[in-house]
């Protein structure tokens, strides 16, 4: 079991002050992905976006921003400019090969490839905190029970948002171990998959969205919410947009317009639940029930989950870098300047006045 200096870690990154408020290689791109060649007849700025996960209710700004507010900043994008991939590695390969321009994915996954020398920079966070929880079935009610070999824990891929969230909560709760110390682990690389595993009894505990845990509880009646991301890890940066440095240098105006639209959407959606419900209905084919959506919205507002001020604060980036090192995702001594390009954010904030 690890001897983790959790109090020093959290104190260093200002937790007390904020509470109130695998290796990657640039292999040839995988066959079978659609050719996303740019439409040269289109008027205005545009970009092709690769996403490593489906759009959840808390992720809405990444698509609502460019499609609903992009025209305010000279951006002309449609749903066809978005492509979902099955993993972060695949979407990064798509970006390096020119199939997409930017990547929306786990911040930790971005940090992992940057640490390995890939020419990427984060330029626009879109989800800081999220409605993620650690949930267990039946007798599993405490984090310490994860060390029981008879308790099967569903985890995400290395550097995936699910695994990073799990480890961040374990550190915050001061239990003295991380996921790598858990004896019985099963990798399920998507939250719908982990939700199904929890519901079927294939696994006993996992990290998933609160509404997914509530759905399982409605079926089984025995789900326990053991801990939450939003209450325990205020400096988290869950999802962000990154792009090859060369693309950013050549398309800074586009990156700034994209960033401004995401910020504008984040601000607009916080104005009322009715507006949020309307927009979720536009971009998610089968959204959660109105009651569930209201609970998600309330958490989003209360815990300020979206980067409405542009994000990329050094303190938050330093926290994620240190978390990645403690997890063993990478060992490089990265700095905020190594991983983030703030030019698009600064230009976006000027556009927004």
Image (tube, grey):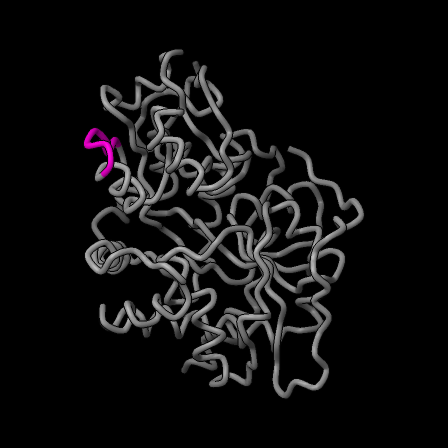
The quarter of the rendered structure image containing the C terminus is bottom left
Q: Where is residue 184 in the image (x, y as percent from the top left)?
A: 45, 17
Which quarter of the rendering shows the N terminus?
Answer: top left
Please tell me which residue is depicted at 71% across the width and 72% down the height of the picture: 250
The percent position of residue 324, horizontal first and vertical second, equals: 52, 37
- Tell me which segment is drawn in magenta: 219-226
x, y percent for residue 224: 22, 31
342 lies above or below 165: below
* Residue 212 in sight from this viewpoint: yes
Determine the residue positioned at 22% across, 68% down: 273
Choose between 335 and 239: the one closer to the eye.
239
User: In the image, is 258 to the left or to the right of 178?
Assistant: right
Residue 308, compared with residue 193, is above or below; it is: below
Q: In which quarter of the image is residue 300?
A: bottom left
Vertical side of 6 occupied by 234: above or below: below
Name the residue rendered at 51%, 62% in the picture.
Answer: 124
The residue that appears at 40% across and 75% down in the rendered structure is: 264
User: Which residue is at the far right?
Assistant: 28
Can residue 8 be seen by looking at this rendering?
A: no
Residue 146 is inside the magenta segment: no
């Amino acid at each position: 079991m690890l001897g983790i200096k959790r109090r020093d870690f959290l104190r260093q990154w200002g937790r007390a002050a904020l509470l109130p408020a695998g290796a990657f290689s640039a292999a040839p791109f995988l066959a079978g992905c659609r050719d996303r060649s740019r439409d040269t007849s289109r008027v205005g700025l545009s970009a092709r976006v690769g996403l490593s996960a489906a759009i959840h209710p808390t992720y809405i700004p990444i698509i609502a921003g460019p499609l609903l507010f992009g025209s305010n900043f000279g951006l002309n994008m449609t749903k066809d400019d978005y492509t979902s991939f099955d993993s972060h590695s695949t979407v990064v390969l798509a970006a390096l090969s020119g199939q997409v321009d930017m990547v929306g994915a786990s911040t930790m996954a971005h940090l992992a490839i940057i640490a390995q020398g890939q020419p990427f920079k984060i330029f626009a966070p879109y989800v800081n905190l999220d409605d993620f929880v650690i949930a267990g079935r039946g007798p599993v009610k405490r984090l310490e029970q994860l060390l029981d070999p008879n308790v099967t824990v569903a985890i995400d891929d290395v550097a995936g948002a699910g695994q990073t969230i799990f480890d961040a909560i374990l550190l915050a709760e001061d239990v003295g171990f991380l996921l790598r110390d858990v004896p019985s682990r099963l990798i399920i690389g998507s939250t719908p998959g982990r939700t199904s595993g929890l519901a079927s009894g294939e696994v006993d505990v996992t990290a998933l969205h609160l509404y997914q845990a509530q759905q399982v509880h409605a079926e089984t009646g025995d789900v326990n919410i053991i801990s939450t991301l939003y209450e325990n890890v205020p400096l988290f940066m869950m999802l962000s947009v990154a792009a090859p440095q060369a693309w950013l240098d050549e398309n800074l105006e586009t990156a700034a317009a994209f960033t401004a639209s995401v910020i504008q959407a984040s601000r607009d959606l916080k104005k009322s639940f009715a507006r949020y419900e309307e927009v979720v209905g536009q971009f998610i084919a089968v959204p959660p029930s109105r009651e569930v959506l209201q609970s998600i919205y309330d958490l989003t507002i209360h815990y300020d989950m979206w980067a409405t001020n542009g994000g990329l604060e050094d303190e938050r980036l330093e926290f994620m870098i240190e978390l990645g090192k403690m997890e063993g995702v990478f060992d490089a001594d990265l700095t905020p300047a190594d991983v983030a390009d703030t030019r698009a954010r600064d230009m976006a904030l000027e556009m927004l006045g």
